[in-house]
Image: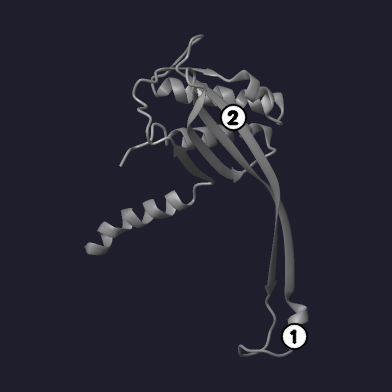
Amino acid sequence: MRTLKLVPIFLLLILSSCSSVTVYSDYDKNVDFAPYKTYAFFKPGIDKVEISDLDKRRILHAIDAQMQAKGFTKSENPDLLVNIFTKSREQVDVNQFNAGWGYGWGWGWNPYMMYGGQTTVSTSTQGTLFIDFIDAKKKEMIWQGEGIGTLTKNVDKKDEKIAEFVSKILAQYPPVKK
């Protein structure tokens, strides 16, 4: 019976470890985040981001949706300015699998190994999205969220992937003070 109680916890751990986006956040510990209720995008910063305009719009739409879900209102005279920054790098994975015949573990040459060896090489693009919240009056960054994960070139999955990045990053805002 005790084992049955542990099964849901085990499944939850497995599902949470399968997340494809890792997030981090940092913030100014001297800031009270409660008064911030309105936001606008920081156009000069967003214009400098070196990604396609289509992906930029996807990110901004996802941020809009998350901010509105948190109760924020877009404004011409905002409390917060929202800026984004992106980085990407190619990741190359080399996997070598030798399924040779023979016996025992250890060092030495195995004449049968040459028949069962297999090497696979795969590449993927690792992307990082930064979302910065800047106090509009003081012009100081007060919070930064970062999401790291594998990007997709599949147009049908881009909206979903970007929404996942943004929702997981903004789930960390406002920070929980300890």
- Give 15 or 167, whichever is nearer the viewer: 167
Q: Would residue 75 be found to the left or right of residue 162 on screen?
A: left
What percent of the width, then of the height, locates residue 18?
49, 51
Colour scheme of the rendered structure: one colour
- Which residue appears at 45% of the width and 17% of the height? 79
Residue type at mark 1? Tyr
Image position of 143 with respect to 99: above or below: above
Q: Is residue 160 visible?
A: no
Q: Which residue is mark 1?
A: 112
Check the picture and name the quadrant holding the N terminus: bottom left
Give the spatial CA distance, label 2 vs label 1: 54 Å
User: How crowded is the residue under tag 1: few (<14 C-alpha within 10 Å), some, or many (20+)?
Assistant: few
Tell me which numbered mark, 2 or 1, is placed earlier along the sequence. 2
Residue at image point 68% right, 25% down: 54
- Crowding at dot 2, Cα within 10 Å, few <14 / some 14-19 / many 20+, comes out as many
Q: Looking at the picture, how far across and down is residue 146, in whole percent?
A: 53, 39
Res 94 quadrant in image: bottom right
Circle number at residue 84: 2
Position of residue 155 relative to residue 69, above or below, is below
User: With 96 as the anchor, is 163 left or right in this view?
Assistant: left
41 left or right of 7 in image: right
Measured as percent of width and height from the top left, residue 104 is found at 61, 90
